[in-house]
């Protein structure tokens, strides 16, 4: 989080301040920690809003007694700006776009796989082959490492708050295994920027496929058959490109990066759209990547997920959320138990916690940053506090939400398609195990929503319908899955509202 200035002579009075653009920067990490010890939360929007009058009283010059150090005391102009924020109804606002604050030098720099030199790529292949060659029971061997995400261990935390922190640590574990191969101590995982075609370097050994050396489902109770013998598979380059368009993966990435708030899965914000982009990417690449039980055995998994982490770090940088203090300012109304309370912050089977994964000393050769020229980031949602001014803009999209899908009745990953006059106009892919009732995380989030952001022109005066498709089960239920067995989901269509 950017350290705010204290008592600058030119600190202007802001007539219409917002929390995300202005107010959150008034509280230094030491201020937040000092007041947290007294039971007052100043690190989040809700905490500052709840304690705003007390804060104003104790920080207003000339008789301020907070912050306790003279260097941190507020100027009269800053105090007036804070008062304006209170009088105006505590507007949340949007994160301003602009150059990121300088950060510490990274200890590991990950690069686009297409930009690696021949020597760097050769070293990467050496490290990958070294991990592949290890015994199937070796904890740093490919079979065991890949088996943490899907079969046989199935630890992965999908569709919930710890999704990004869990995968960040998972990539580090795999990268450390690559680095443990003799002569490969400086190797870092490159990323595949999914906005570009699948690189040729990932279409040849050792990155093109993986032949499972043992049955990953045999040790599960009850056993999960069907994955031995098994060789990972992908779609053609044309098929991948077609699927990425079908599931609007690049559009979901663009929308996610423009969000001011972390949000909550199934609700809004960066997290919701980035997870939809993640799932759509899995479903686009191939039948293996689209099957949560075995997706991590496909070597492309690691380069795809390295890009997902790059995008998350891009968003963190855009929103000044690369530190824990800065990240918490983007929660705005969301329960943060998952971030700070044991055992809800755990990332099994790793010893790290979600909180420890917010700040990272890993960086990338390129981040997707939003500039001033592109305007501030957005904070559009289906509702807003009536005390704040708001606006519906003709250019803003309509949110069509397929709400209340009972995923636990659906055998495996599936797609949801919105049709207009019988023709598909948008699809979303949802990644899950073939037996979601046997997955603890799935059961905790058994009822899910999928969002479609559409222009009004795509929807008005047309007959709309919804279809759920489950690949690989046509002999049992047909491709189209009965909506009645999926919990009879409802349609929630709304104009999106933002602060005026």
Image: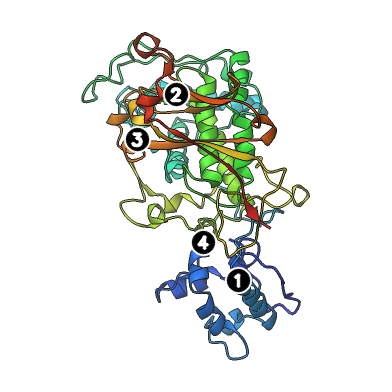
Looking at the image, the residue that sits furthest to the top is 475
Say what secondary structure mark 2 lies in. Answer: strand
Task: Quadrant for the N terminus, please.
Answer: bottom right
Query: Which is in the foreground here, disc 3 or disc 1?
Result: 3
Going from the N terminus, do you reach mark 3 or mark 1 first? 1
Query: Separation of disc 3 and disc 1 at Cα?
Result: 40 Å
Going from the N terminus, do you reach mark 2 or mark 1 first? 1
Say what secondary structure mark 3 lies in. Answer: helix
Query: Separation of disc 4 and disc 1 at Cα?
Result: 12 Å
Rendered image: mark on residue 26: 1
Question: Which residue has dot 3 on it?
Answer: 442
Question: Which residue has dot 4 on it?
Answer: 325
Task: Establish if 234 lies above or below 330.
Answer: above
- Image side of residue 337 versus residue 426, left or right: left
**Discs 4, 1 touching: Cβ within 8 Å:** no
The coloring applied to the image is: rainbow
**Discs 4, 2 touching: Cβ within 8 Å:** no
């Amino acid at each position: 989080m950017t350290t705010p200035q204290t008592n600058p002579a030119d600190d202007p009075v802001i007539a219409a301040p917002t929390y995300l653009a202005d107010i959150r920067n008034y509280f230094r990490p030491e201020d937040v920690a000092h007041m947290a010890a007294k039971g007052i939360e100043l690190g989040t929007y809700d905490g500052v809003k709840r304690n705003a009058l007390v804060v104003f009283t104790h920080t207003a010059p000339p008789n301020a007694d907070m912050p306790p150090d003279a260097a941190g005391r507020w100027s009269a102009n800053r105090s007036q700006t804070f008062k304006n924020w209170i009088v105006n109804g505590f507007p949340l606002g949007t994160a301003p776009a602009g150059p990121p604050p300088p950060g510490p030098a990274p200890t590991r720099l990950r690069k686009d796989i297409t930009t690696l030199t021949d020597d760097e790529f050769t070293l990467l292949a050496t490290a990958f082959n070294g991990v592949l060659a290890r015994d199937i029971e070796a904890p740093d061997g490919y079979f065991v490492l890949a088996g943490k995400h899907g079969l046989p261990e199935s630890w992965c935390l999908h569709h919930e708050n710890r999704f990004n922190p869990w995968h960040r640590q998972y990539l580090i574990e795999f990268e450390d295994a690559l680095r443990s191969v003799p002569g490969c101590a400086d190797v870092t995982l490159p990323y595949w920027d999914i906005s570009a075609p699948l690189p040729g370097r990932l279409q040849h050994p050792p990155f093109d496929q993986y032949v499972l050396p043992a049955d990953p489902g045999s040790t599960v109770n009850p056993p999960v058959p069907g994955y031995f013998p098994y060789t990972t598979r992908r779609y053609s380059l044309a098929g991948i490109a077609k699927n990425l368009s079908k599931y609007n993966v690049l559009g979901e990435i663009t929308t996610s990066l423009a969000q001011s708030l972390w949000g909550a899965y199934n609700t809004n914000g960066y997290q919701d759209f980035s997870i939809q982009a993640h799932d759509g990417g899995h479903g686009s690449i191939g039948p293996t990547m689209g099957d949560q039980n075995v997706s991590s055995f496909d070597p492309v998994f690691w380069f795809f997920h390295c890009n997902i982490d790059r995008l998350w770090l891009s968003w963190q940088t855009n929103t000044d959320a690369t530190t824990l203090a800065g990240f918490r300012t983007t929660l705005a109304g969301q329960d943060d138990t998952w971030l700070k309370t044991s055992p809800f912050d755990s990332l099994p089977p790793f010893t790290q916690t979600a909180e420890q994964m917010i700040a990272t000393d890993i960086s990338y050769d390129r981040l997707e940053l939003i500039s001033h020229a592109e305007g501030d980031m957005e904070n559009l949602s289906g509702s807003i506090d009536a005390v704040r001014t708001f606006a519906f803009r003709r250019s803003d999209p309509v949110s069509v939400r397929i709400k209340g899908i009972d995923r636990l009745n659906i055998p495996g990953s599936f797609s949801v398609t919105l049709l207009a006059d019988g023709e598909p106009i948008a699809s979303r892919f949802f990644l899950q195990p073939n037996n979601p009732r046997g997955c603890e995380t799935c059961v905790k989030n058994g009822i899910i929503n999928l969002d479609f952001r559409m222009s009004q022109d795509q929807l008005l005066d047309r007959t709309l319908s919804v279809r759920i498709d489950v690949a690989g089960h046509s002999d049992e239920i047909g491709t189209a899955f009965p909506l009645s067995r999926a919990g009879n989901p409802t349609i929630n269509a709304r104009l999106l509202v933002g602060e005026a």
